[in-house]
Amino acid sequence: MNIGLILVITFFTLHVIFKGQELTEIIRDLRMAEPFWIAVGIVTALLFVSGESVIIHYMLRVLNQKISFLKCLKYSFVGFFFSYITPSSTGGQPVQMYHMKKDKINIGYSTLIMLLITIAYKAVLVLMGLGFLIFNSDVVVKYATDMKWLIVLGFALNLSFIAALILIFLKPIWARALGIKVVGLLTKIRILKRRNKEKYTEKLIGICDTYAMGADYIKKNLSVVFKVFLLTAVQRLLLFSVTWIVYRAYGLEGTRYIDIITIQIMIAVAVEMLPLPGAVGISEGCFLLAFTEIFGIGLVKPAMLISRGLTFYLVLFVGGFVTLADRIISLKKEKRN
């Protein structure tokens, strides 16, 4: 259903964007991009996913779990596939933990690893966003003014998420009590079903306990956490660099690498927490708003297609292929056994 929703939103988004343009024109504009730079973009997008594999492999080694890097690569591609097809990227990590469980990794270890990755992924984005917003504010004002309210909303949602994590870390009992009250309020006003109140409460208590365990580990292993944050920053930069690679693919010059990175970070802040699978539709719209002046009116649409194709649809396709291949191999093993 989520894949179907992505396809429908993508179809209507492209229909609106390319309305009045012939398919031959679109193909001609796409073919203007240099193949060498497109190949660099493909490698960069796949390295972005592999960056998470490096973090998972590193964490498993720290926890004395002997798992091959190839399996960690599988966890990452499967995780990104499910993250991209679920609202606010909520589906990836449970599936990754399921696959780790199948490989006999303790559920406590996999939970801790996914927890650290989540915290680092969100915190690095916010830190990058605030840093570039402060030190490159003129570029944000020049190119991203049209989506300022989305950026403000994005910062608010991300900071709220991080604030909730900090509250759970520092005051887990307070966080649990507050969460139970929120669940009670949501069921009272019928946003959540009343008959499921107990189930929601148990799930909330489980999440709080998990995060409390993670907080204890973080306090005792700050050097490990620092390395995870550093690796996550490199991973994030790989993804944000794809737009600059597309810029070079069209032989364009004049806009600095750091400026394109700044705008791409602002787009990520604006769209990542929105409840749309893969932020489809809104990401394309923000790209057109922010990059029209940089790419020019004639090239911004094909540039958007290539950039989103590399950072979203390529990862979605490869992740889907890995997920399907793994499932087929598992079924064959089960049948053989």
Image (cartoon, helix red, strand yellow):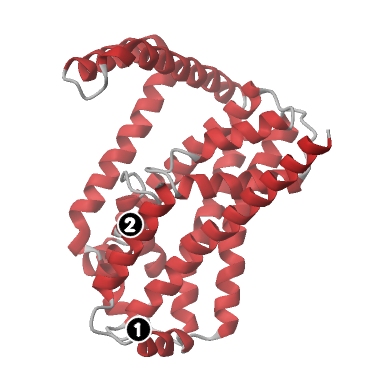
User: Compared with residue 148, is residue 199 higher up or lower down, i.e. above or below?
Assistant: above
Q: Residues within 10 Å of mark 2 (few under 14, many from 20)?
A: many
User: Residue placed farthest to the left in the image?
Assistant: 189
At label 2, the amino acid type is Met
How far apart, in angstroms, are the residues tagged by discs 1 and 2? 21 Å
At label 1, the amino acid type is Leu
Residue at position x 30%, y 33% in the image: 160
* Residue 223 visible from this viewpoint: no
Residue at position x 33%, y 66% in the image: 11
The answer to which of marks 1 and 2 sits earlier in the sequence is 2
Q: Left or right: 317 with respect to 2?
A: right
Q: Foreground mark, 1 or 2?
A: 1
Q: Left or right: 329 with respect to 299?
A: right
Of 39 and 170, which appears nearest the observer? 39
Residue at position x 70%, y 41% in the image: 57
Q: Quick one: SS at disc 1?
A: loop
Of 299 and 78, which appears nearest the observer? 78
Of 316 and 253, which appears nearest the observer? 316
Quarter of the image where one finds residue 101: top right
* Residue 80 visible from this viewpoint: yes
Q: Left or right: 302 with respect to 105?
A: left
Tell me, yes or no, whether the two marked residues, 1 and 2, touch with CB atoms within 8 Å: no
Quarter of the image where one finds residue 174: top left
Q: Quick one: SS at disc 2?
A: helix
Q: Residue 175, position in %: x, y?
A: 35, 15
Residue at position x 48%, y 81% in the image: 248
Q: How crowded is mark 1: few (under 14 residues within 10 Å), some or many (20 or more)?
A: many
User: Residue placed farthest to the right in the image?
Assistant: 337
Q: Name the residue under label 2.
A: 266
Q: Name the residue under label 1.
A: 299
Residue 204: mark: none
Q: Residue 58, position in %: x, y?
A: 70, 40
